[in-house]
Image: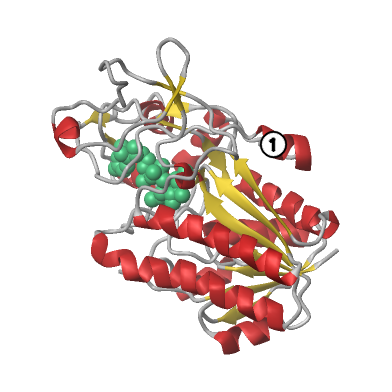
Amino acid sequence: MSRLLVTGGAGFIGSAIVRAALGAGHEVRVLDSFRPDVHQRSAADHLPDGVRILHGDVRDAAALEEALDSIDVVCHQAAKVGLGVDFQDSPDYVSTNDLGTATLLAAMERLDVGRLVVASSMVVYGEGAYRTASGAPAAAPPRRRQDLEAGLFEPLDDDGTPLVPDFVSEDARLDPRNVYAQTKVAQEHLSAAWARSTGGRAIALRYHNVYGPGMPANTPYAGVASIFRSALARGEAPRVFEDGGQRRDFVHVTDVAEANLASIAATETARDDSFRAYNVGSGHVHTIGEMASALAGPDGPTPVVTGEFRLGDVRHVTASSRRIADELGWSARVGFLEGMHEMRTAPLRPAVL
Ligand code: UD1
């Protein structure tokens, strides 16, 4: 068993990892900044007994020295997530995610902590992988505002025929298309550079769309499942953007926590000076429209397809989670309908706004 530090351990995914890690017998410490735009200080009340909770920022070297003392392995979940409000958000993304990770890694070297699991995201692949109608691999061009305004949402090949989304493997080219995605790529590269230069062992988990009880609500950074869930709670229909055909893989937060535990164990046996990335998804693809219907259920209001779009959103992102199954023995357990059924009534996490 390890002495584990979870950064962002009071958050949605971090707190699920804390609960799973305690259940597995790890000694768990949390470092969390309790940012008011993300969650209330009382988020700490939801953490189980037996966890030492430190209030501090990963950019604060003094807070890190205390947090990392006698720690074996760090699970780095602290980050600013989502698409953000507008480009004025970019310095805060870069500071929180990139500078935060570099500051953490430097402190880990000083305190001789050599194992890391870092939260990454499918957004590192941008539009992901596609094939032409005849089956040849193809890349999706950047989305153009005029196409989106004209209701043309699918990426097209040179002849104007829709491309078919494919499953992305971890070896696919990284192609971040918004500021947040860029910070996740940078976090991975920083972790790889740290592993090379210090002999440390790092695993990056590229999460698909994580959902489940305790998801953040009513913030500009909330994921689509919690936005729909909040609308339903107000008695309103979920508002589905584009034509609702955007493809995603929804993975339950308890499964993501288990993927972290498998990775924590793997950093113990991995060779020194190593970095490995894994996709973390349920393996089942659904459209946003299907998700809205599943969440609303048979008695809920019928989702409305609005045709709105957000610049910076990718059209489809679907990845293969074979590598983590083959190498770490992890696969998701919670089924889509089962998870969405639970989500209908699951409590969300209010922010202080
Ligand atoms: C989400 C996460 C991102 C994570 C990534 C992993 C958020 C905000 N984003 O990105 O942090 O790294 O998964 O794959 O948590 N939509 C609607 N109606 C709405 C809001 C959104 O139809 O009211 C649609 C969007 O147009 C988009 C889809 O839902 O097509 C998913 O949106 P969202 O959950 O915000 O972001 P992802 O890009 O999937």
Q: Residue at x 40, y 36 (%)?
A: 127
Is the CB of the residue bearing disc 1 within 8 angstroms of ligand 1? no
Q: Could you tell me which residue is drawn at 25 percent across and 31 percent down? A: 242
Q: Can residue 8 be seen in this view?
A: yes
Figure colour scheme:
secondary structure
Displayed quadrant of residue 316:
top left
Q: Is residue 335 above or below residue 62?
A: above
Furthest residue to the bottom? 62
User: Measured from the top left, where is residue 335 in percent x and y?
Assistant: 60, 30
Quarter of the image with the C terminus is bottom left
Q: Give 205 or 196, whichever is nearer the viewer.
A: 196
Q: Residue at x 62, y 53 (%)?
A: 204
Front residue (pair 87, 30) = 87
The secondary element bearing badge 1 is classed as helix
- Residue position marked by numbered label 1 in the rendering: 323
- Tell me if I can see residue 352 in this picture: no
Please rate how many residues cluster around mark 1, counting C-alpha atoms within 10 Å: few if below 14, some from 14 to 19, many from 20: some
Location of residue 113 with respect to 212 vertically, above or below? below
Q: What is the x, y in percent for residue 159?
A: 27, 15
Q: Residue 243: x and y, percent?
A: 26, 26
**Horizontal arrangement in the rendering, residue 134 relative to residue 260 (left or right):** left
Tag 1: amino acid: Arg
Q: Where is residue 299 in the image (x, y as percent from the top left)?
A: 37, 27
Task: Please tell me whether residue 139 is drawn above or below residue 33 in the rendered image.
Answer: above
250 vs 52, left or right, is: left
Residue situated furthest top in the rendering: 134
What's the residue at 44%, 25% (across, down)?
A: 130
